[in-house]
Image (cartoon, helix red, strand yellow):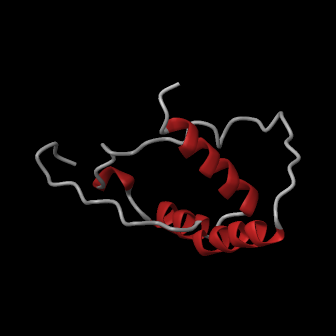
Amino acid sequence: MSSRAKLKALPRIKTDGEAEAFTAEADLSEYDLSGFVSPRFEFQAKSEQVNMRMPKGLLDAVKAAAERRGVPYQRFIRETLERAVASRKL
């Protein structure tokens, strides 16, 4: 593709299934990836375990939010924690 050709904007992808389908079919060289930010922690080995107690209503809300996003609820919790840590300058 010519460097002068206009690159397509990436579609908004909300679930793992949508991402898998898009990457299986798309020629990514046609898309503008300049704004892409790789997850900092998601692909690292999960070597540590956390056990916490929370109200049932909160866990139900977390699971519902994760389902709407199309991700497992534990991944949703990890992503939420990562965003919280990344948004603060430590």
Report the residue at 16% width, 46% height from top: 2
Horizontal side, residue 12 vs residue 84: left or right: left
Question: In this rendering, is residue 73 above or below 51?
Answer: below
The spot of residue 51 in percent (x, y) is 88, 46
Horizontal side, residue 8 vs residue 64: left or right: left
The spot of residue 52 in percent (x, y) is 86, 49
Horizontal side, residue 37 vs residue 21: left or right: left
- Which residue is outermost to the front? 55
Report the residue at 30% width, 43% height from top: 34
Report the residue at 69% width, 66% height from top: 62
The spot of residue 88 in percent (x, y) is 49, 34
- Which residue is outermost to the top? 90
Residues 42 and 86: in front is 86
Residues 47 and 30: in front is 47
Question: In this rendering, is residue 35 above or below 17?
Answer: above
Question: In this rendering, is residue 43 above or below 15?
Answer: above
Quarter where residue 56 is shown:
bottom right
Residues 76 and 11: in front is 76
**What is the tally of numbered marks visible in this picture?**
0
- Which residue is outermost to the left? 4
The spot of residue 16 in percent (x, y) is 60, 64
Report the residue at 53% width, 70% height from top: 18
